[in-house]
Image (spheres, grey):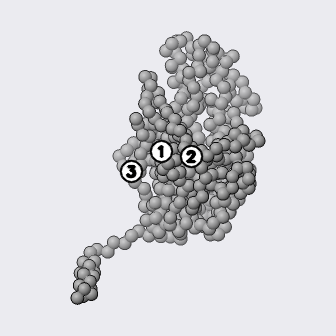
Amino acid sequence: MKNFKYIFILGVFGFLGACKPTITAPTATGSVDFTRYIAVGNSLTAGYADGGLYLTGQLNSYPSIIAKQMATVGGGSFAQPLFTTDQASGTGYQTLTGFSSTGSPVLTPVVATAVRGSIPLPGLGTIPLFTKYSGALENYGVPGIKLNDILNPAYGNGNPYYERLLPGASPTNTTPYLDFVTAKSFTFFTNWLGNNDALSYATSGGASNDLTDKAAFATTYNTLITRLTATGAKGACATIPDVTTIPYFNTVTIGAILAGVQKVAPTITALYISARNTDGTYSTRAATTADLIVLTFPTSKISATTGYGLDPRNPIETQYVLDANEVALVKDYVSAYNTTIKATAAAKGLAVFDSFNFLTNLKNNGLLINGIGLNSNYISGGIFSLDGVHLTPRGYAIVANQFIIAINSQYGSNIPLANVSAYNGVLLP
């Protein structure tokens, strides 16, 4: 009797199932396979935010968001080098704890919990060593890496973010990044390398980290894409944004500093900076609105007593200013890099997310998503994190969607977009 009972129950469920409309889960269309998706890139790919790499940022990285959406159309698992819950603050980061009486944000550091030690390296000083990760891996984002670094066999010794992913300990590593990411077969990739080849120079105010040579960039980028597509994998690349559109260069302005000075010293009419000349030398001149002050500039240094910033004999140092000629130089290099990226991607039939155009439009016009107004303003804009360079979870969700749009357009797939409203911007105190 029990057997007949089970047959009857199964028959009822079968009948009820037959009465229901058929619901078909979405599947990928077009000539694309998402079985093993890997993400190649730098800090943006890793989910870096608020001046550090920590668990919450990793969990909301744009590749992890893309992978979740891919999973609905047949995508496979996606492993990231996550910090444990006991080490959730990772390498340390900044949090917003309030605002000063003048409205300036008060940032408080969260102490790192994933540092296992440090090591002195010739020419690099003492670098930290982060807790090793040895599990499965699909997100290969390495903060700080340039395209110019991916063939360097010693790079895994000097970059602690890459060192933590390698089985060896610094200074014994000899695996170039490109070999590392291609060691295991994959079917699809996203690539957002190249940002730091311009950004590192810009954020230093042009004081260090030379721009990667244009020809060298082109050669290495071609090598990268050739390797990534060698076994038939398809993918999507992103262009490099105009670094001058990010809050890091548009929050502390010449006008705002001068207005603050004039409240106590009305006769002051100019700030003075050490600026690049067209021949590459530096000299002092009055600052203009075309000169960009970095977010980290300590405005307390401006002083009528010492004359710092107010007297041509004591100008604001170059590391605090991306001056007009440096801006032009960076824009020229980024333009050349993006020409290479687009041409190389087109030659291989890859999708392209044009982050240059997208973020420029964001700065100029803002963005409206699900009734939420977003822009590139510091803190209030909702997209950029507290370091003014990297993104909030909401910003990463927007980037993920832009990649998805490009992928669907190129390959005829139907990956659904992420719900941007489900991801937060800067958390207010």
Residue at image location 26% in from the left, 79% down from the top: 13
- On-image quarter of the C terminus: top left
Instruction: Measure how far apart labels 2 and 1 are at the Cα level.
Output: 21 Å
Instruction: Measure how far apart labels 1 and 3 are at the Cα level.
Output: 12 Å
**Where's residue 39, x and y in %?**
57, 57
- On-image quarter of the N terminus: bottom left
In the depicted structure, whether residue 345 falls above or below residue 102: below
Question: Element at badge 3?
Answer: helix
Question: Element at badge 1?
Answer: loop
Q: Earlier in the sequence, mark 1 or mark 3?
A: 1
Residue marked by disc 2: 114
Q: Are marks 1 and 3 in contact (CB under 8 Å)?
A: no
Q: Give left or right: position of 366 versus 235.
A: left
- Name the image quarter holding residue 220: bottom right
Residue marked by disc 3: 422
Residue marked by disc 1: 392
Which amino acid is tagged 3? Ala
Q: Are marks 2 and 1 in contact (CB under 8 Å)?
A: no
In the depicted structure, whether residue 118 falls above or below residue 314: below
**Where's residue 108, x and y in %?**
49, 33
Which amino acid is tagged 1? Thr
**Where's residue 273, x and y in %?**
65, 24
**Where's residue 404, x and y in %?**
49, 58
Q: Give left or right: position of 108 versus 328.
A: left
> Could you classify mark 3 by the number of other residues whose Cα lies within 10 Å: few (under 14), some (14-19), or many (20 or more)?
few
Residue at image location 46% in from the left, 30% down from the top: 105
